[in-house]
Amino acid sequence: MIKSLATLKRIVRFPVSNVFQKYFRSVSTTSDNFLPYENDRFQGITIKAEKIDIEVDEFQSQLAHTITNLKNEKRHIWFEVPTQKVHYIQSLIAQGFEIHSARRGDRILLSKVRVF
């Protein structure tokens, strides 16, 4: 699987379109106030709470900003929450996320389908 825009540009011999550039877009939490995420192959994103270490009020602000700014580009959001970060779940449910599944003693997976 191709994991970066630079790799894609090396492989193909034609100009890479904006569609591919959107797919490989990387987001910086500090400059854009986005939560860190990874694109998936189904035009959605996955956010892993283990990579987030901020207070709940800042989390709510960054979550709202991320959803608002990606709603026209992404179809769904998956959010993995380890048991050590369950304090984020209330904010996620308030934003329309639903619990998808849980692994005992490990993590809870929430989803928000139809972001737009």
Image: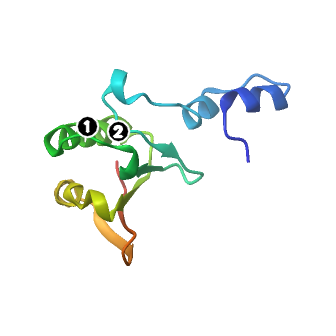
Question: Position of 23 compared to 15: left or right?
Answer: left
Question: Position of 55 compared to 2: left or right?
Answer: left
Q: Residue at x 51, y 31 (%)?
A: 26
Query: Can you give x and y, in whole percent of width and height, for residue 113 in the image?
Result: 37, 60
Q: Do we see residue 31 in this rendering?
A: yes
- Vertical position of residue 85 compared to residue 68: above or below: below
Query: Can you give x and y, in whole percent of width and height, for residue 67 in the image?
Result: 31, 42
Q: Residue at x 18, y 42 (%)?
A: 55
Q: Residue at x 29, y 42 (%)?
A: 53
Residue furthest out toward the bottom: 104
Give the label on residue 35, or none: 2
Question: Position of 111 compared to 4: left or right?
Answer: left
Badges 2 and 1: C-beta atoms under 8 Å apart? Answer: yes
Earlier in the chain: of badge 2 and badge 1, it is: 2
Residue ID for mark 1: 62
Query: Can you give x and y, in whole percent of width and height, for residue 82 in the image?
Result: 36, 61
Quadrant of the image occupied by residue 79: bottom left
Query: 72 or 1: nearer the eye?
Result: 1
Q: Residue at x 44, y 51 (%)?
A: 75
Quadrant of the image occupied by residue 23: top right
Q: Tag 1: residue type?
A: Gln
Q: Tag 2: residue type?
A: Leu
SS for dot 1: helix
Q: Do we see residue 112 in this rendering?
A: no
Question: Position of 41 compared to 14: left or right?
Answer: left
Number of disc labels: 2
Query: 81 or 73: nearer the eye?
Result: 81
* Gap between marks 2 and 1 measured at Cα: 6 Å
Query: Can you give x and y, in whole percent of width and height, for residue 61 in the image?
Result: 19, 37
